[in-house]
Amino acid sequence: MLIGQYPEMSLFDAQMQHGKLAEQVKGGLDVLAIQKQEKVKVERQAKKERLGTMTNEDLFADWLVSYTHRPSEKTRRPPTAKTVARTQYRWDRYVSREFKHQIPSNTARHDVNKMISAAAKRSPEESRKLFTNINMMFEYGEEIGLIDDRPTIGIRAARLGATSSKPAERFLSLKEVGVVLNYLLRHTGIKGNDPHAAPTRTSEIMCLCLIFAFYTGQRRADVYSVRWRDIDFKNRLWVIPAEQFKSRREHQIHLNDTAIEVLKRAMILGESGTGFVFDTGRYVSEETRRPDALNRALGRILKRKDLGMTIKHFSPHDVRRTFATLAGEHLEYPQELIKKTLGQLPEDRLVLIYQKGKQWNKQIEVWNGIGELYDGVLE
C-alpha cells in the first residue's frame, strides 16, 4: 500500500510509518481498509467545502457534464453534441449574471420566475427549453446533496410566457421558389452565372448554402455544418454520421446535379482549413458556428428590392417543408418515401421496428425529381 510520496514524506518518516503499520497488521488490523476509509472522509469533507461555495453557474457546469453522458429515458441515448452545445448557448444567452452567481440553496422560486419571465420576453420557445434545463439542473443538485428541494417545483413555465412555438405551415409555391433561386444564383458562379456578381465571398458562400438546402431538403444545422469528409463525389453521396444526426442514425442524401455544382463551386472558393464546405472564414470551430447565420442571411435577402417580387417571410426550415410539400403535390411521391429522404422516422412504431427497407433507388428519384422541378423554374 502507498504510505506517502517523496519528497513530501522523507525516508526516515516512511520507515517510522512502515513500522507503525507493521505493528497494526500484527495486531490483526486491516490497515488498507482503514486507509480507504480515511481517504473517503477526506474526499467527503472536500466535497462538502466545495458544495458550500458552489454557485448556480458551478452547478450548471457540473450538471452539463453529467447530462452529456447520461442516456435520456425517451431515447435511451445520451444527447448529441449539438444538443449539448445548444444547452450551453441557451444558458449563456438567456440567464442573467445575478442568477448565475446565486448560491443554489439560496435560490428561491421567485428568482426562477424572474429569470424565465425575462427570457420569455426575448424568446418564448427558447425560454421553455431553458426552464426544462434549469429544472434538470436542480434535480441534479438534489441528487448530489447540494439542495434539499428544487426551487422549480410548482412553476408552470407557460404562465411566465415560455411556450412552444405554433406548428409552422409556411411553404413556398413553385413560383416563389423560382424567384428566390434565381436571385441566389445571380450571386454565385454556378449554372452559367458570373462568379464576380456576388458582392463578397461570404455572401456567395451563404447563397450556395441556401441553394444546397433547397436541393437536398435537409435540416438547417446539417446543411450549414456539412464537412468535406462527409461528401463522396464518386457516388454522388452526402453522409451525415449517426452521432450528428437528430434521430441518431446515419442518414444518406443523394446529390442531384445542382447540389454537385454547388459543392464544386464551394471547393473553388476555398476554405480556411476548418473542413466545413460552407466556410466563410469567420467561424473556425463547431462551437462558434451557429446555424442561425442562415436565418440572418436569408432575412437580409428577403429585404432586397431587386429580389423580383415581394416574398412573404420564410425560414430555412420552411425550405425543408417546401421540399416535402412540392415533392408530394407536383411529383406525387408518397409521404413515407419523402420522409425517408428527409431522414424522418415513421410515426408508427411497428413500421420502425419491422420495416427496414430504405427504398434507396426510389429516394434517388425524389432528389433528382426535385432538382428537375426547381431547374424548370430558373431563368
Image (cartoon, rainbow, N blue to C red):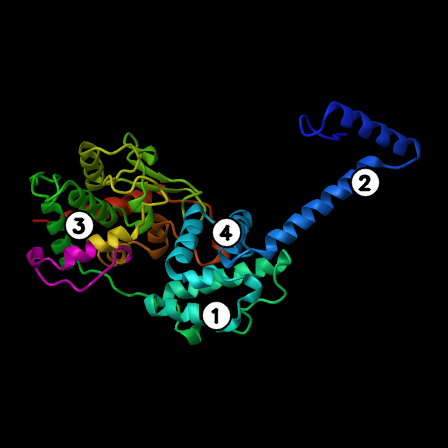
- What is the CA distance from the residue labelled 2 to the residue labelled 3? 76 Å
Q: Name the residue carrying label 4.
A: 61
Q: Which mark is residue 34?
A: 2
Which image quadrant: the N terminus?
top right
For marks 2 and 1 on the same chain, the one whose residue lies earlier in the sequence: 2
In the picture, the disc for residue 312 is none
Q: Which is closer to the viewer, label 3 or label 1?
A: 1
Mark pair 1, 4: CA separation = 19 Å
Q: Residues within 10 Å of mark 4 (few under 14, many from 20)?
A: some
Question: What amino acid is found at the position of numbered circle 3 in the picture?
Answer: Tyr
Query: Does 170 appear above or below 200?
Result: below
Front residue of 332 and 13: 13
User: Between tags 2 and 3, which lies in front?
Assistant: 2
Q: Which mark is residue 111?
A: 1
The Cα atoms of the two marked residues, 3 and 1, are separated by 52 Å
> Label 3 neighbourhood size at 10 Å, few (<14), some (14-19), many (20+)?
many
Q: Left of 93 or right of it: where is 331?
A: left
Report which residue position mark 3 lands on: 374
Dot 2 or dot 3: first in sequence order is 2
- Farthest top residue? 11
State which tag comes first along the sequence, 4 or 2.
Answer: 2
